[in-house]
Image (cartoon, coloured by chain):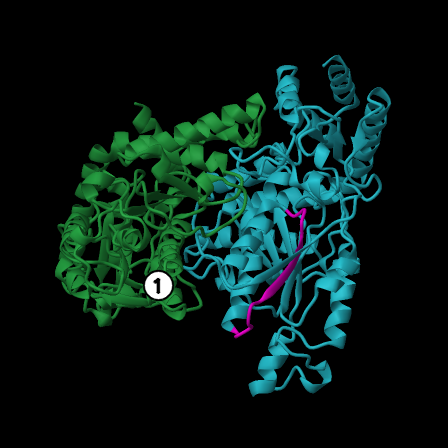
Chain colours: A cyan, B green
């Protein structure tokens, strides 16, 4: 009952058929209800000494614990940021700059060609700043082959960053396999010091020169941007085997303006933003209490709804795919059909002007997208992700429909009808 | 009428006598009313192509224009961040890293010893990263002598960062005088290139080597962190003569989580956060639309209330000062009485344990602070600002009361009565 009520109220907020949930989500009213007091009576600074401040601090601590529980992590492994973008920056630049400060020459990062701009642009900056980046390809199904990661590993590698699920084509990457591979690599070889150092010769407890090597031998770390995966995939950080993980509130029915970086205990990285000692000294600035409380509440709801909603949306997704492929015999699916987010439909319609079609669908009250909205609109409107899966001819002819809690079969049917009429 | 209503409603939110407005402010209900739709029906991503996204983008653009108008600036000089802290980081690190990338050797920054941690900690990082920082002292009245800035200037100086008003003792710095001095210095000397280059020899239009010198000769820039000054001081950026300016929403009755960096047209600095091309490519991450709309609305209200509220609070401040000095003959005022924010009362009570007194006042329903809350609480609780004005014996014996829109004479009298009884 509560759920139905909420679904209805989320949906009421959008007058159109909203099929762009991967871009951003409406705020769940349950989330808003819990978080709003922190804009009103509980407005106080959590760093202040008096009881109102202490109350707020306690609620921030509880929210941190909620987020940690969600990831099966410890509360001191959770760091709040202003966005998933900032979390990606904090992690990648934090590892890179830390490695530089430890004397690692030309720190090397491995990532994929289909990452979000907030990873790719950071990597481009790393390249301009004395680092090295290998962009591994993906297979035609939009999934990275772990062997490509393995091939790219070298002694100077400090970080591997592979997104959990792609924002455009929804393909889910083999995070656990890559983590296993990284662990294996760490076991059998020296790392990050620029030379092969068998791990036995560098006991972790040694101090001095040996200690330094031991510290460096923690490299390479493994990061996954899970922004799109949070609602649908396994989120146990230990099971995943990652050292770092990124989340974004605006993709999970919480307000824009909050992100989260999971940083495994014991790992030291450089800060991105310096100042008052908030977030255990890693990220300065008065806490966005409202946003933090909202993010934690949103995760509680995700936890409850994950299984049912995932199944429900997968059914709608498969229905939409099958109808489109039937109605448009030349259309092709972008990305793997099986290892795919339950809410992602991305289809290439040969020779279609996708951007123009987005406007046409908009005129019919349907909100969807062609390429990612997280890209400068003044740049060209072609999809580097669709190109990367070997379909350059589809880069400007693909439409992305991403479903959400408010999506109904009626809406999908309306979309199908409208598509046919165009 | 509207005003009275709002004052009452702000005040109702805090059950205690809240005298810590410099730490953070409650959210004005008028601000909340205007901004809330952007958490509800207008939740869309401003980068999306359909009409709902375009509507949101338009409102973000309007908010940017409102902020620009407030500073008598251009809309493309306004960059939204997640906090004043982030804006300070963006500006200082942005100038420093840009200078490094242009080949400036050991870029030099001048700041004061009483800046906020979000400036001082960034400066400490600059020192660790190949830069040089001069921390100029302040006079015993808590105001910087512009001649100290002048003395510190050298060819490698790329930035001068002086806060507009101090967060602890409320002293207002001579920003216009410093700006004048910097302009004069730029006129008569070569800058940033490590050698004296008379400006006539470096025409701005020259390309090649001359052009590079000309570009570098824009140094030094002048930045002011105006976070505490916004409500009370002249905020015309051109009149102030600054190149950069920082604001924070949480100090002006808007939600925590949004800040603003003013960057004068034509100045190029390095980004802090990379990704999608938001904020004209300078600061990536989906816009915190709710926070941005709220910040703009809060500035409109500041504009309207500034004169009256400034005067009203100054009267209360002077009343509180005079009563304290009468009741506690050994008490002394920290910082200049004239060049001071109208809402700041900071007093040294010899031999008082300030932190303990904050707890005692808290028990009596009064919220105030000893040192800045923007400092790691695990660090010592002594005030570096009070030390810097030549009163080390007061560093742990000073109380700060900061007034706001909700403060009444009754509250001040209650505070006075409680102080006397302790």
Image spot of residue A316 (x, y percent): 81, 29
Segment tinted magenta in the rendering: A102-115
- Which chain does the numbered disc 1 sit on? B
- Please tell me which residue lies in front, A205 or B8: A205
Q: Quadrant of residue A32?
A: top right
Q: Is residue B267 above or below residue A191?
A: above
Q: Which residue is drawn at the image coordinates 50% and 38% (left, top)?
A: B287
Tell me if I can see residue B8 in this picture.
Answer: no
Residue A112 magenta-highlighted: yes
Q: Is residue B257 above or below residue B380?
A: above
Image spot of residue B227 (x, y percent): 32, 47
Q: Which residue is drawn at the image coordinates 38% and 50% (left, top)?
A: B269
Q: How many circles with numbers are drawn on the protein?
A: 1
- Please tell me which residue lies in front, B5 or B134: B134
Mark 1 Cα shell of 10 Å, populated few (<14), some (14-19), many (≥20): many
Magenta span main SS? loop
Element carrying mark 1: helix
- Please tell me which residue lies in front, B321 or A292: A292
Image spot of residue A227 (x, y percent): 65, 46
Residue B349 magenta-highlighted: no
Q: Is residue B327 left or right of residue A118?
A: left
Q: Is residue B341 left or right of residue A252?
A: left
Circle 1 sits on which residue? B123
Image spot of residue A417 (x, y percent): 77, 15
Q: Quadrant of residue B40?
A: top right
């Amino acid at each position: 009952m509560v759920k139905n009520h909420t679904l209805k109220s989320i949906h009421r907020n959008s007058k159109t058929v909203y099929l762009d949930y991967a871009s951003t989500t409406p705020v769940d009213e349950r989330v808003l209800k819990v978080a709003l007091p922190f804009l009103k009576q509980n407005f106080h600074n959590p760093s202040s000494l008096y009881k109102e401040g202490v109350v707020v601090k306690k609620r921030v601590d509880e929210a941190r614990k909620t987020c940690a529980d969600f990831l099966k992590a410890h509360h001191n492994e959770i760091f709040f940021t202003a966005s998933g973008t900032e979390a990606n920056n904090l992690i990648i630049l934090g590892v890179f700059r830390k490695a530089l400060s430890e004397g690692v020459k030309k720190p090397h990062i491995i990532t994929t060609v289909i990452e979000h701009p907030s990873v790719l642009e950071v990597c481009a900056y790393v390249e301009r700043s004395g680092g090295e980046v290998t962009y591994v390809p993906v297979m035609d199904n939009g999934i990275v082959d772990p062997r490509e990661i393995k091939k790219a590993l070298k002694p100077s590698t400090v970080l591997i960053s592979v997104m959990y699920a792609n924002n455009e084509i929804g393909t889910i990457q083999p995070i656990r396999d890559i983590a296993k591979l990284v662990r294996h690599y760490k076991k059998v070889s020296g790392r990050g010091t620029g030379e092969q150092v068998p791990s036995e010769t560098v006991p972790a407890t040694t101090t001095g020169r040996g200690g330094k090597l031991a510290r460096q031998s923690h490299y390479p770390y493994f990061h996954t941007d899970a922004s799109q995966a949070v609602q649908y995939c396994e989120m146990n950080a230990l099971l995943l085997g990652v050292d770092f993980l990124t989340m974004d509130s605006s993709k999970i029915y919480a307000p824009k303006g909050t992100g989260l970086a999971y940083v495994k205990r014991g790992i030291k990285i450089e800060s991105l933003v310096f100042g008052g000692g908030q977030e255990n000294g890693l990220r300065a600035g008065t806490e966005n209490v409202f946003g933090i409380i909202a993010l934690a509440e949103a995760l509680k709801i995700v936890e409850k709804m994950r299984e049912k909603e995932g199944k429900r949306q997968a059914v709608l997704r498969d229905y939409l795919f099958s109808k489109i492929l039937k109605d448009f015999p030349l259309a092709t699916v972008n990305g793997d059909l099986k290892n795919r987010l339950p809410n992602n439909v991305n289809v290439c319609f040969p020779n279609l002007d996708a951007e123009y079609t987005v406007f046409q669908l908009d005129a019919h009250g349907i909100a969807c997208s062609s390429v990612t909205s997280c890209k400068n609109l003044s740049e060209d409107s072609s999809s580097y992700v669709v190109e990367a899966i070997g379909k350059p001819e589809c880069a400007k002819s693909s439409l992305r429909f991403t479903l959400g809690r408010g999506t109904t079969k009626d809406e999908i049917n309306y979309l199908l009808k409208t598509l046919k009429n165009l």
